[in-house]
Image (spheres, rainbow, N blue to C red):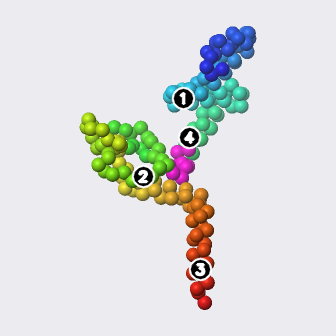
Amino acid sequence: MASEEPSEVVEDMGVTGELAERVYVTGSTVRDVSDTESSLARATDALLRGAVLTGSKDRSAAARELSGYIKNAFKSTPGDALFLSAIAPSLDGGFFAYLRHHETVWATDIALGVERVAYKYRRIGRLKERYSLALVHKFAGVFMSIGLPAEYEGSRDVYAEVLREGIK
């Protein structure tokens, strides 16, 4: 249904009147919600229309609930995410930094400007130390809750037992 135009769905179903209008609005909502190129305004409008369509809420109640959900998502980010209001002077629309991959990169492999030389990486911004430390701290918390590999924990336990036995 998301690939067909809502008017085509109404025609294929052969419905008329109020039911045709509901089918059309439902089709438009499904299309808008599933559109990956959608703007935030278009996506939230589609979600609100969907809530009204189901009859579970009026638009203002659905908007309050959605606003609360979004606010909570910003306040309660996953352990490896940190909200940043800007990442560079020209990039100040609000971003989330995720530390999903940690890799050592040689400084000579990073393009710091707009040179025509090929580089493996391009720096788009640099986190201030307090933010990079906060992000690393949150990332460490993720691994603390997950735990370390069983081989590591087994090896650690063996050494702890050997040391414990030496204490008399």
Q: Mark 3 and mark 2: span between their CA atoms? A: 35 Å
Nearer to us: label 3 or label 2: 3
Q: Mark 4 and mark 3: span between their CA atoms? A: 52 Å
* In the image: residue 61, left or right of residue 106: right
The residue type indicated by label 2 comes to Glu
The residue singled out by tag 3 in the image is 162
At 43% across and 46% down in the image, what residue appears? 84
Q: Is residue 34 visible?
A: yes
The residue singled out by tag 1 in the image is 36
**4 or 3: tag closer to the N-terminus:** 4
Q: Which of 109 and 139 is in front in this view?
A: 109
Nearer to us: label 1 or label 4: 1
The residue type indicated by label 1 comes to Thr
**How many discs mark residues in the rendered view?**
4
At 30% across and 38% down in the image, what residue appears? 118
Give the quarter of the image for residue 12. Answer: top right
The residue type indicated by label 4 comes to Ile
User: For the residue labelled by badge 2, is the local secondary structure a helix, a strand or a loop?
Assistant: loop
